Image (tube, rainbow, N blue to C red):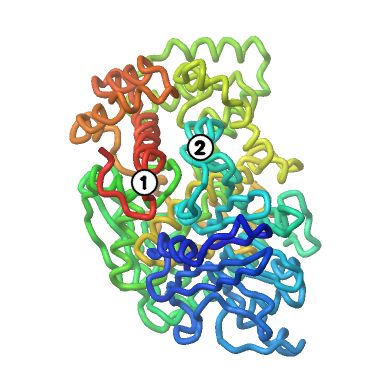
Amino acid sequence: MCGIAGAVWFQPQQAITQDTLQQMTNSIAHRGPDDSGLHYRHGDQSGVALGHRRLSIIDLGSGHQPLSNEDQSIWIVFNGEIYNYRELRPQLESQGHLFSTQTDTEVIVHLYEQYGAGCLDYLRGMFAFALWDGRQQKLFLARDPIGKKPLHYLAEKGRLLFGSELKALLQVPGLTRTVNPQAIDLYLTYQYVPHPHSILKGFSKLPPGHFAEFSDRGLKVERYWSPPFNDKSPTTPVNEEGWKDELRSTLTEAVRLRMRSDVPIGAFLSGGIDSTIISGLMQSLSSTPIHTFSIGFSDKNYDETHYARQAAQRLGTRHHESIVSPDAIKMLPDLVWHYDEPFSDSSAIPTMSLSQVTRNEVTVALSGDGGDELFAGYGRYRAVELASRFDLLPPAVKKTIVAMSHLLPRSGRSGSWLRRGKRFLERLGQSPMNRYLNWVGVFPEDLRKELYTPEFHAQVRTQDAVDVLNQAAEFASQRDFITQITCVDLLTYLPCDILTKVDIASMSCGLEARCPFLDRDVVELAARMPISLKRKDPSGKSILKETFSDLLPESIQKRSKMGFGVPIGPWFRLELVDFLRQILLSPTCLNRGLFRPQVVTRLVEDHIAGRSDHAYQLWNLLMLECWFRGFYDRSDVHLPLKSLG
């Protein structure tokens, strides 16, 4: 697990200096505290600059990067882990490739020499890397299929800049930083800026499952992997027991591969189904008790430690438990600086706390991320199923139900049956995908239109928000709508929210997080699986619970899903009320020209007074304004923030 940064150029006036490369690399030192390295070559017309920060996990003594092949015609900087590198190496050696280290990084170099872009088909892991091919004078960029590891870039005429984090690119002098209005609209919808978009114009994120090639002919971006929801494999199991056997063996192998490490390793254990299964499989593969980690909160509505304790006792792990009291005001500068773009998933706060607690004991932690998307575990899939039945009703009946929904009061605490019921009913008259977007989105389209000033509204295309989902759904177009929605979440919400949150939070303290559920073989098996095996009951994940029942206490099998969140609603009425007003109702915020001041004021005051619950929308706006102050309004983004005042 590391950080990478660099540039290539084909016009001498576009060259960056070695000092700039060093600054780019230094800005992401938190991603790799153990080692650093540079490769810099500047010719008459072209040049290459590769920077690396290393968190040592495999081959601690000889894994220095940048790394090259024997004749130094190929150089690489790599972030991530290739779990099957030991299996790949003997075949490459039999083909004549010579190795000088024991690292997974060097396997990528020789795979590329042998297969070019086809090397990506052999890799089983999480990765983002930049490889300079001196023979063909091109830069090859790649990102893993699901998007565990991030990769940002800026392609200009004659030059490409890249980095694990956006802040690395911003160290290059002379870059124009202009906010992308479309990205703001997408952020207010999703609570993140989805790939390939970036909050800044001209900057991009390489999407998961894609590679890019940059040469003097320009940039080419191609998809090399997509989830096989529409494919029927000739090896598909013929019955339910066959699916269970395949799931057990495939996920167990994914866990086994991810336990390879030359440093201490453990697991996040929330007490939910997914993390308990991963911890249980780890324990079954270990001769000694594994380390498991959970954090709790004094507010029992957000505390899961008793479930984690039950799971640890059942599995026999060496469990570590901490009660934390996150101080949101103190943590906000760190959140803004580390996440680079506006990001308003409030669970980033406890995720960062959990990562810090875990890093005190181990350097690698396995997690259960991906289980909900792959095995239909989110409660919202029940709403999708119910709405699909509603779509079969006569038009007159549907119209009456939607009209009656508007009679329900708007008040009610976040998560209450009244609030959720009203939100469900009000959107039933929309198309299925627009309906789903408004259920999962932070600001629905009608409220975004009300919020925007006329000048800002003229700069955005609100249709782009639902197009993000429609494009993802095409990869499951031949399946039922619930399966299409799980595909949408796998390709959008998972990489852009969950995996971004975990990568940034864990790397902020030098912790590597690994996700066995997101092994390529596991993902492809789950994509082909019938939805009937995943949703035998409304809670979902049926086949997971049945296949791994030996690892799951009965209380965990039957429990309702609890989000890993913080009480932002009460915070905005109590300890954060002054801070909320100070930031969102300040002239600095209200005069940016994006939002109507009266609408922002109404959202703030209605929430504080308890007339409505706008907690998630206010957190969304707060993180956006904090991003403006932390990144857009300052130039020294290589330094951690001290305050947002």
Q: Closer to the camera, 533 or 128?
A: 128
Location of mark 2 (residue)? 178
Label 1 SS = helix
Residue 358, image x, y percentages: 32, 66
> In the rendered structure, which disc, 2 or 1, sits on the residue that comes first in sequence?
2
* Picture residue at 72% right of the left edge, 59% below the top: 215
The 10 Å Cα crowd at callout 1, few under 14, some 14 to 19, many 20 or more, is many
Residue 425, image x, y percentages: 51, 21
Instruction: Tell me if residue 158 comes above or below residue 128 in the rendering.
Output: above
Residue 615, image x, y percentages: 34, 30
User: In the rendered image, which quarter is residue 140 located in?
Assistant: bottom right
Q: Closer to the camera, 635 or 260?
A: 635
Residue type marked 2:
Thr
* Picture residue at 81% right of the left edge, 62% below the top: 234
Q: Is residue 361 left or right of residue 225?
A: left
Q: Nearer the viewer, mark 2 or mark 1?
A: 2
Q: Is residue 593 left or right of residue 389?
A: left
Residue type marked 1:
Val
Real-space Cα distance between discs 2 and 1? 18 Å
Q: Is residue 126 left or right of residue 119?
A: left
User: In the rendered image, which quarter is residue 597 located in?
Assistant: top left
Q: Closer to the camera, 391 or 97?
A: 97
Q: Closer to the camera, 506 or 285?
A: 506
The C terminus: image quadrant: top left
* Picture residue at 66% right of the left edge, 61% below the top: 243
Whether residue 552 appears in this view of the structure is no
Location of mark 1 (residue)? 336
